[in-house]
Image (spheres, rainbow, N blue to C red):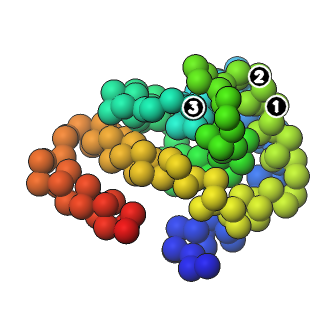
Amino acid sequence: MVLSENDRMMETAPSRSAGRSPGAQAAQAGRSSVSARDEARERQTAWQAIACLWLAQELGDHDLQAIARALAQSPYDWTELQRIYLYEVAPVVHENLRMDKGVWGAFDLQSLQKAITKNMRNPEYRQEALANREYMTAFVARDWERIKQYVRELRSGRRLTAEEQSAILRLLQAAER
């Protein structure tokens, strides 16, 4: 398997201390419990938005833009959002699209949080997620790339031109072949 530079960076990046959430790490670092709660809430918002990619329904452009808006408003840069997508959310929800009767409306936040927290406590989960990333993201990779484009547009304050959008679409179509 060929790893991209970003994958190598994520593979060698230090894992979260004993699987603790960023909120727990911030609290331990002496930040107030209010800040830790705010960070946990922001993380949950990102989890919920990203998990929508694996709902057993066709997502339209409007749905992808709504996900992008939630992510663009988060305090996380794209590298961290990519980590959340690959290491936190995908391992928990990816099987939903492979089931006959998967979740359609929304994933239960408590169940999602519990499963993600459990995975993060497993010292091997990052390596397993990296090894299985293509399997876990196969059905949603194209939508994730579109969300990435929308997040960039939202954060930059400018929309891509029709020419830029066409070029990206051609690249995505070529990658599918």
Circle nearer the viewer, 1 or 3: 3
Hey, which residue is sitting farthest bottom in the picture? 2
Q: Which disc, if any, is residue 25?
A: none
Viewport quadrant of the N terminus: bottom right
Q: Name the residue under label 3.
A: 56
Query: Are discs 2 and 1 less than 8 Å apart at CB?
Result: yes
Residue 20 visible in the shown view: yes
> What SS does tag 3 mark?
loop
119 up-or-down from 40: above or below: below
Residue 118 place in picture, x, y as percent: 86, 41
Q: For the residues marked 3 and 2, what is the alpha-carbon distance in whole angstroms?
A: 19 Å
In the displayed structure image, the side of residue 174 where residue 35 appears, left or right: right
Residue type, label 1: Lys
Q: Name the residue under label 2.
A: 110
In the displayed structure image, the side of residue 163 where residue 121 appears, left or right: right
> What SS does tag 1 mark?
helix
